Amino acid sequence: MKIGIYPGCSLTGSARDYNESVFALAEAFDIDFVQIPDWNCCGATAAHNLNKELSLALPARILALAEKHGLDEIVVPCAACYSRLVVTQHELKKNPELKNRVCEVLNMDYRGTSAILNVIEWIDKYIIPKLDGKISNPFSHKVACYYGCLLVRPDKVLRYDRAEDPQTMDIVMSKIGATTVEYPFKTECCGAGFSVSNTDIVSKLSGKIIEDAEHRGAEAIIVACPMCHSNLDMRRNDINKYWGRKFNIPVVFITQAIGLAVGLPASKVGLKRHFVEVNIS
Amino acid sequence: MARIGVFVCHCGENISATVDCGKVAGAIGELKHVAYSTEYKYMCSDPGQNLIKEAIKEHNLTGIVVSACSPRMHEPTFRKACAEGGLNPYLCEMANLREHCSWVHDKNELTTEKAIDIVRTQVEKVKLNSALQPIRVPVTKTALVIGGGIAGIQSALDIANTGHKVIMVERSPSIGGHMSQLSETFPTLDCSQCILTPRMVEVAQHPNITLYTYAEVESVEGFIGNFKVRIRKKAKSLDEKACTGCGLCTTKCPQKKIPNEFEQGMGMRPAIYVPFPQAVPNRPVIDREHCTYYIKGKCKICEIVCPTKAIRFDQEDEILELEIGAIVAATGFDIKHSDFFPEYGYGKYKDVIDGLQFERLASASGPTNGSILRPSDGQVPKNIVFIACAGSRDPAKGIAYCSKICCMYTAKHAMLYKHKVHDGKAHVFYMDIRSGGKNYEEFVRRAIEEDHVNYVRGRVSTIYERDGKLIVKGVDTLLGAQPVEVVADMVVLATAGVANQGAEDLAQKLHISYDSHKFFAEAHPKLKPVETNTAGIFLAGACQNPKDIPDSVSQASGAAVKVAALFSQSELTREPLVAVVNRAAPPLYSTCVACGMCISVCPYQAIDTEEFKTRDGKVVKKAARINEGLCQGCGTCVALCRSKSIDLHGYSNNQVYAEVVALLNEF
């Protein structure tokens, strides 16, 4: 089974832990990932703030490459990359003129035929059906599933999960033995890119997300986005300083949790790379 | 020899701005058989009409073409002028130069040429017009009022008081509608039940009103003055004549855990029940969906305890066939419930309730006997938040319109809360306060100034529960979009008013139009607000759009007057533009071969078969026959007739061919 994967910048940099867990999981379930050859930046936040054509052309090139290499399905673990790719496919489908213009700019053929899967969709389709008998170490913890913004929004484009109070991560976590808490902060803003330019905003917003999860008795926050993870985990010291408290709750990628449940060692799924110690297993 | 008069209207500048009216009149005047051609600024005005009348006499005209606007607006005006000029009104045709030409084209030569072409076709058509006589049909002087809420009640009483018979159909077991659920009413705070229940009793006792509750309209056929309506009386499982309304059965019924619709699910009711103590009629019905006997085949406790042996388990639905002259649709509205709002918890928080639920909490006859207690634990909420505009004015939710009543009832709710919980704090989040209406603005000011309700201008983004409290996160746009967080004990959503369940289905049965929100459509938004596009069917109350009680009652009386005006005539005249099957002298009788195709396609069931018999009773010929009272002139049968035996008065095949040929021939 050959599935394309688009790692984007995060998974090769600040989210190597996420990357390791995704690949470890693929290996454990005999999934053959093909990294899209010669992939480029998805444009992230910068491109669509500056130039619409550029913001569509960058993801379109990635998708065109996937098509060229016969990849009918590509997994995009980073929620921001996922959003850019899906939005591009949507916009170009809606507007054939724009599509022709983008093809001209790229000097490539883009048809929009590759299916784009976020990490939960990938888990749902390829991991969950094969889970039977594989869980050697059930993840029996109370967890708060934090979806962030880009995994479920904009609702009209993604049509993935419900935009308010989404459920897909909760369902996956319950299948590996976790109990999920009723958590109203599932899609609250973590501060996103302010992580770099105005850390105080992140300290305030991410702090609320962490505080409520702890308050509801969660032992871990489960995420599926490198940006959410870096704000909740890497910025923990700033958050603690801002709030004048010490939050200990670890932040775990959903792929790491599944990895642990199927018996992969903590080091194999990148758990040793976290800033906040993950003392659950 | 035809002598046609042509009158070209400028319609102010509506036509003359892009069409050279003088040139049109001049060119048409050159045509053969056109005896007179002129232009005028406003043909529909009094001098314009006089122009027509005088020209008919002076030029001895045999037909006229008024080249003006769409016939929808002024055809009756010009036909009347024609008749007053001494010419049969059906010898008048209209060429639509406004909607079909001047409004949709720029000013140039081609536009004027097109106008000339349009007039030419009508000149050719009118030459073939024949003088027609209006059809007279009798009027059945009985009105049907659908819906027993305050609008239906008002309409029924007003019609009945003019001396005409009224049949009222209500689908629930009692009349009263939403108004019977309300605690107090704005802007006077008088008790809703106290002003409504006397009206309900009046309906039940009025000699001219026949009331069918637990009944629905099954089908509607016919036309103004002559509707045939089938009503399904659902089985109440009760002999209403034997029942005394003692209520013993309702207290002994072992099934007591059915959510009470009247209490908006905040109380329970048995399977045999009267919806509320003041119900009219005050007789129970058995809810067969939940009754133990109908589910499991045994129980019958109600039958055992009934002192008058009134229970009838084997009763069946009954279909009534009624002759009706006019119909008032007063089927009311519904509201969105709290589960419509994902951001407010999809209805999973017990203490986030809707406006009607609050009405029941505040009502002396409600589940808490009028004490404001929150549903989750029965405690008095000390901090309460009201959200006006929950769903309304929110295109993202699919409801772009204002529900109109929420601003006022939210002010009332906050006021009632403050009157009952003196140490409580009430907050209202609002977009705008829309309090247009007599004494309405004063009422809202009272809530703010005398009862100290905290009004916050801004919307609420989310509500969530934490440690048994509801955290309401919103924004105060008057304080520079500052985020506001209220820790509340209870939240009341003024949810959007929406079309009632089954509205679309009923509109289709009545053949009336409805808008994209399934509210019934009026014939004209300003000048015909109580009429529908179907003659003889009128609207009252919130089935048209959300309305408060005064507006519903006013409109209901308006609808009643329309019905009374209709019933003041002994017969109605109808346009004679109907289809006819040709007839000829024996032995042909008709070119129709009675194949029956037209019978099966007629949407109005207006066609049957006529038999021609010899003196000794032998059938020698069969042919289709069209009932001119039922025919609406749609022309479906004409298009389908294989032997070309059917023609439509006013739009005969020859007339239509003449129009086409006129267009094909170069001018």
Image (tube, coloured by chain):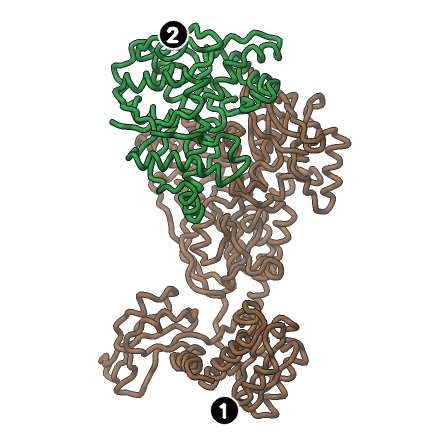
Subunit bearing disc 1: B
Question: Farthest bottom residue?
Answer: B1
Kindly identify the residue that appears in the image at 36 percent across and 30 percent down: A38
**Chain A's colour?**
green
Q: Is B651 located above or below residue B365 in the figure?
A: below
At label 2, which amino acid type do we have? Ser
Question: Farthest right residue?
Answer: B449
Kindly identify the residue that appears in the image at 26 percent across and 28 percent down: A2
At label 1, which amino acid type do we have? Lys
- Rendering coords of residue B211 (x, y %): 50, 50
Q: Quadrant of residue B401?
A: top right
Looking at the image, which is closer to me, A191 or A100? Answer: A100
Q: Which chain is brown?
A: B
Report whether residue A175 is seen: yes
**Residue designated by label 2:** A281
Kindly identify the residue that appears in the image at 54 percent across and 29 percent down: B344
Looking at the image, which is closer to me, B137 or A187? Answer: A187
